[in-house]
Image (cartoon, rainbow, N blue to C red):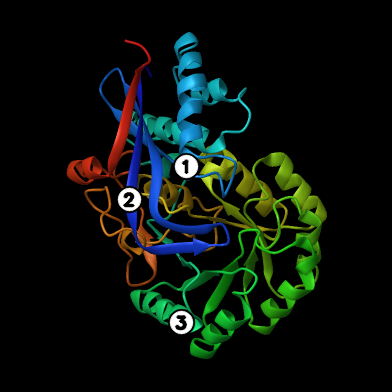
Amino acid sequence: MRYRSLTVEQLELPLVEPFETSFGVELRRQFLLVSLRSSDGLVGWGECVATREPLYSEESTGGAWAFIHENVVPRWRQRPPTALKGVRDLMRPFRGNRMAKSAIEQAALDLEARAKRRALSSWFGGRRRRIEVGVSVGIQSTPAALARRVGAYLEQGYRRIKIKVMPGWDVLPLAALRRAYPSIELWVDANQGYPASRVDTVRSWAERYEIRQVEQPFPDRALSAHAALARNAPFRVCLDESVVDADSLEEALRLGAVQSLNVKAGRVGGPVAGIALARRATRAGAVAWVGGMLESGIGRAHSVALASHPVFTLPGDISASDRYYREEILERPFVLNADGTLDVPSGVGIGVELDPRAHRRALRRRKTYTLGR
């Protein structure tokens, strides 16, 4: 493989509705697309899921762009890789910057799969033609509004509901949902919103309202609190922000702090690392599934391909394109099937193509770096 150029683009898409978590409220999603062009004209795409501000993690779109510009491109020009492994080896010495690294790895994966005329899902070892998905619902204005929103998603076909919670927004919304929909599979995600001292509080409402999974209630380094919550609990404790690499997963497993692993390629440095972490978690008796970061269609296509791998056994936070965006940047957006699934694209690479007009409307800036002839 001869890589001719790398392009970084900053795009912005308005959300269908505000998405509120314990980190804050998003009205518009700013993100980066990374594309790699080969000497024979093929292009592979990846998405950097860092946000405008470093709230979910220490990364931001501006920081990711700077990392690619100041570190990745100069080293690439000095030591041009000729395959996916070389791309990953080139980035390995740099600490952190996992979301930027993941976007580049995704682009290289897409390009390699296209060059070999294979679907990326097949390259991963994926066996599913459809993947089961759930929906993640942000904090709403009132519990009644939340119940109405969840009802609409259930009518659309989503079979698993996850809601965002935080101190002051937990008991009342959960009570409202259980009154309205007593039998749904209900997960919650706190995005580290509770102090580590609130184990008994979280356990109390999780048991009372028959929550099936509690995701990242405490700060990322509070593994002992997560382990205490998991002990003899009738629900799964899921880790997201706490697990960023193999070492953090091993520590969580040793303490008994993780029974379910949310795998986001961006958070762990790429899809290859994501599959390895999922395999390690399942060998230890946990389950794994693919999380979401409000991706555009490019990131969504990568997540769908990843979720087709058999190591992921729970419905992912991937959802249809219209869950988040009125206008997608793909020619064919992802559509929810009646059985609560998304189709896994069967075309080469990630199996989707950009809509040129929608792409142009969302584009804010672009820079292309020549890598070689």
* Local crowd size for mark 3, using a 10 Å CA cut-off: few (<14), some (14–19), many (≥20): many
Q: x, y percentage for residue 239?
A: 66, 56
Identify the mark at residue 157; answer none if there is no mark.
none
Residue in the image at 44% along x and 17% along y: 82
Amino acid type for the residue under numbered disc 3: Ala
Label 3 secondary element: helix
| Quarter occupied by the C terminus | top left
203 or 84: which is nearer to us? Answer: 203
Quadrant of the rendered structure where residue 113 is?
Answer: top left
User: Mark 1 or mark 3, which has the lower sequence index?
Assistant: 1
- Residue found 74% across the figure and 62% down from its top: 195
CA gap, disc 1 and disc 3: 38 Å
Q: Position of residue 354 (x, y in %)?
A: 25, 42
Q: On the rendered structure, is 13 left or right of 289?
A: left
Dividing the picture into quadrants, the one containing residue 294 is bottom left
Per the image, the residue denoted by label 3 is 147
The first of marks 3 and 2 along the sequence is 2
Measured along the vertical axis of the image, is residue 322 above or below residue 354?
below
Name the N-terminal-most of marks 1 and 2.
2
Which marked residue is nearer to the observer: mark 1 or mark 3? 3
The outermost residue toward the bottom is: 179
Q: Which residue is mark 2?
A: 13
Q: From where the camera sits, is residue 84 visible?
A: no
Residue 252, given in percent of the width and then of the height, sits at 75, 51
Per the rendering, the mark at residue 124 is 1
What is the tally of numbered marks visible in this picture? 3
SS under mark 1: helix
Q: Amino acid at mark 2?
A: Leu
Amino acid type shown at disc 1: Phe
Q: Secondary structure at mark 2?
A: strand
Q: Residue at x 63, y 45 (%)?
A: 277
Disc 3 and disc 2: Cα gap in Å?
Answer: 26 Å
